[in-house]
Image (cartoon, grey):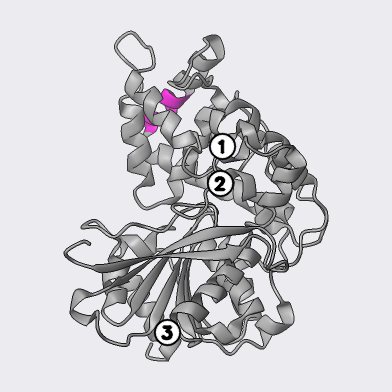
Amino acid sequence: MNPAYTTIDHVFTVPLDHSAPHGQHIQVFAREVVDPARAGEQLPWLLFLQGGPGGKSPRPSAGSPGWLDQALQTHRVLLLDQRGTGRSTPVTARAAARFASPAQLAAYLGHFRADSIVADAELIRRQLCRDEPWETLGQSYGGFLTLTYLSRAPEGLRACYVTGGLPGLTATADEVYARTYPRVRDRVLDFYARYPDDARRLRQIADLLTATEVRLPDGDRLTTRRLRTLGLALGMGDGFERLHWLLDESLDTDGELTDTFLHQVRNLTGFTDNPLYAVLQETLYGQGAGPTGWAAARALDGFAAFTEEADPLLLTGEMIYPWMFREITGLRPFEDAAHLLAARPDWPPLYDLRRLAANQVPLAAIVYHDDMYVDAGLSLRTAREVGATRVWVTNEWEHDGVTASGGRVLARLMDLAAGRA
């Protein structure tokens, strides 16, 4: 128990496939959090849907996100470790290696998308809330989950808050990445404008990696394309500074890469804690329109500025590429299954367009005008297509605004949903 919070741990047994409830089961973990002064009260529930895919919920501590303290003023919060993450039945490299065949692993992983997570949430809600509806806060991918929830079980929802995560309801993976690369390019150039020496430093490191074989602490080779994935951080409020200070200690006085830098790069790009992020990233856009087929890799070929020889060297963002599953230790057990998932043509739809158009559950969303990860144009199009939706568009924060703002973003969204703002 943290002195600031009263917490209760819950473990739920759920079907791997909710359409076959008597088949294989897995466990889903969730942590209930409440203000100690209100622990005995009947408070409304707020379910937190973490970003990702493949991200576990935050752990309450003295450094907990400010939105949590804001929420606990009025709610009892449930921090859900979505299936496969955190303390739920894990999907890790070690677990993947136990499967008898890639086809079996791919079939298993097919049950870890938004539709299954929403079915888990509904099972949990009925156990915890006596079938009373609850509210949800969806950060980033949590917003994608929210739209699936509204499509499949709106009766379980009283109100929904989405922060940087309104998906394009009909956008294909190809459309998503065609829109994403220009935003990433612009963000990298903004980073170089702030830190011009870092542009030269990254080009210097890339040239070094081309001329010399450099190994990370786990034995993986550090290549220019893996180096470029450090750009993932640039969409967060502190991302420029985090990358800048990483590069600040990258080279020693002899011009060689430092152990400190190599250790951090391994941790930042290794997917040890969240392989599902890589495995499921493009499946988010699979909705029966044919295979996603490594859309990010295909789109990359259409942007000449992103060649590895370019100067300045452009970093990449949240894109996932086939080479990662060959070259990154934590992803190798998933390689063949990942190719099967990329080739799968029959992903079931995640969004019910008619149901969403008729939605009556209050939905309040913040759209970050310059969001590097989620296209604002697609988000605003979705807001027009979903009933009972109110949107706040701002460039005051980056993608992590719900955390960076303390409790201000969540407080305003609650006001919007309730008609107070």
**Residue indicated by mark 3:** 416
Rounded to the nearest whole Å, what is the CA distance between mark 2 and mark 3? 37 Å
Reply above or below: 286 against 279: below
> What residue sits 56% from the left and 50% below the top?
183
Q: CA distance from mark 3 to mark 1?
A: 42 Å
Kind of residue at disc 3: Leu
Find residue 108 and report its horizontal and vertical position in percent: 68, 51
Q: Residue most toward the front? A: 22
Name the front one of labels 2 and 3.
Answer: 2
Is 178 drawn above or below residue 378 in the view shown? above
Q: Amino acid at mark 1?
A: Ala
Residue placed under numbered mark 1 in the picture: 93
Residue occupying image coordinates x 57% and y 47%: 276
For label 2, count other residues whose C-alpha is less than 10 Å away and answer few (under 14), some (14-19) or many (20+). many
Is label 3 in a helix, a strand or a loop?
helix
Q: Which residue is disc 2 drawn over?
A: 91
Please say if the residues under marks 3 and 1 sit with CB atoms less than 8 Å apart. no
Quick one: label 2 or label 3, which is nearer the N terminus? Answer: 2
Residue 155, relative to residue 152: is it above or below?
A: below
Quarter in which the N terminus is drawn: bottom left
Percent x, y of residue 378: 63, 66
Q: Which residues are magenta?
A: 196-202
The number of discs equals: 3
The one nearer the camera, 109 or 358, is: 109
Q: CA distance from mark 2 to mark 1?
A: 7 Å
